[in-house]
Image: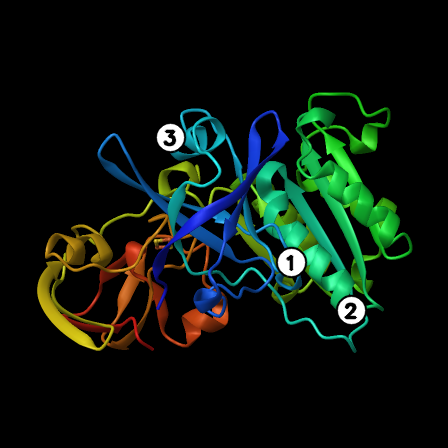
Amino acid sequence: MPKFHPLKIRDIRRETGDCVSIGFDVPAELKKEYAFEPGQHLTLRTHLEGEEIRRSYSICTSPFSGELRVAVKKVAGGRFSSFANEKLRVGQTLDVMTPMGTFSTKLSPGQARHYVAFAAGSGITPVISILKTALEIEPASFFTLFYANQRASSIIFIEQLDALKSKFMERLSVHYILTQEDPGTELLHGRIGERKCRLLCNAFLDTADVDEFFLCGPEEMIKDVKGALSKMGVDSRKIHFELFAAASANKTGSTIKWTPPARPVLSEITITLDGKTFTFDHTSSGLPILDAAQKTGAGLPYACKGGVCCTCKAKVLEGAVEMEVNYGLEPEQVAAGYVLTCQSHPKTSRVVLSFDE
Ligand code: FES
């Protein structure tokens, strides 16, 4: 079960004009709880003007660095990201949820693989964690990164990436793509859409030789790159993706609209959390199950409420539900009965869910 603990801010580093990274002190007794996989994220919680705000940010360090750090890019109108960039100070404490997320892969020293990532803007955050860890743990593996930004000055972690290029000269190649500045070559200029993805792949790699792809950025980029890769014959099981705005439901900019069922189902919902079980009645045309449960006073875990972060994941033990969107669960998890309760509506007259499975 994910849990919040208050963690003190050890340092705040300015990465670009509109992005800071925040390092946390983890007390010795919590080290185990905050052990993480590369690519995972943390949900931060605070109160601003009397309102509770939760946002998820990807961890940008590697597990063996001994450092727990996230990067927060200021977004227009973003209350938490503005607070983090302008007001947060070293020594303050934030509620930090234990690490979550499945945007990752199993790494092992004996593997010789080629990993490729497409990232845009702050989508670099989980990718740099995976990249550093993979190159460190697997001495025979290669990594190719295509990283899109508006201009050179907005490239997050540019110094780290350049240092990594020097350290892993033979095994890491990084290609910066700029959308609002001329990088001197047409190939590296403009948004990463379907055509650009195909051109970049044709120029720099053979997709048949790539073992895994990681995509992190806005929904449109992910959709386009996935489309291009599948047209080039890449097996969808090799493609991992994470939406850039894991932070907030309403900021994912999703174009998918859910239509409530024409004939709503009245359902008895039973939920088990931390060994305790409670039941309430709910209709499929109303709020998602997570919100409906919260109205009854239940303290279920959540962060983004947008189908991205998986903090609200539970297993369906009886009955069936329908999800509005799912950007976070892998197909195997869905097949095993897991759902995102912030997106779920009952389909049967009885639904039994467990957060403890
Ligand atoms: S709360 Fe993030 S996926 Fe449900």
Q: Residue at x 37, y 59 (%)?
A: 311
Q: Residue at x 16, y 60 (%)?
A: 298
Q: Which quarter shows the N terminus?
A: bottom left
Residue situated in front as seen by the camera: 20 or 174:
20
Q: Residue at x 70, y 51 (%)?
A: 117
Q: Quadrant of ligand 1?
A: bottom left
**Can you identify the residue that label 1 sits on?**
62
- Measured along the vertical axis of the image, is residue 150 above or below residue 96? above
The three-letter amino acid code for the residue at tag 1 is Ser
Q: Residue furthest right?
A: 170
Residue situated in front as seen by the camera: 244 or 299:
299
Which is nearer the N-term, disc 1 or disc 2? 1
**Can you identify the residue that label 3 sits on?**
79
Which is nearer the N-term, disc 1 or disc 3? 1
Where residue 92 sits, quadrant-wise, is: top left
- From the viewer's perspective, is 294 left or right of 199? left
- Expressed as whole percent of the image width and height from the top left, the position of residue 357 reads 34, 78
Disc 1 to disc 2, C-alpha distance: 13 Å
Which is nearer the N-term, disc 2 or disc 3? 3
Q: Are marks 1 and 2 in contact (CB under 8 Å)?
A: no
Disc 2 to disc 3, C-alpha distance: 39 Å
The three-letter amino acid code for the residue at tag 3 is Arg
The three-letter amino acid code for the residue at tag 2 is Glu
SS label for mark 3: helix
**Can you identify the residue that label 2 sits on?**
138
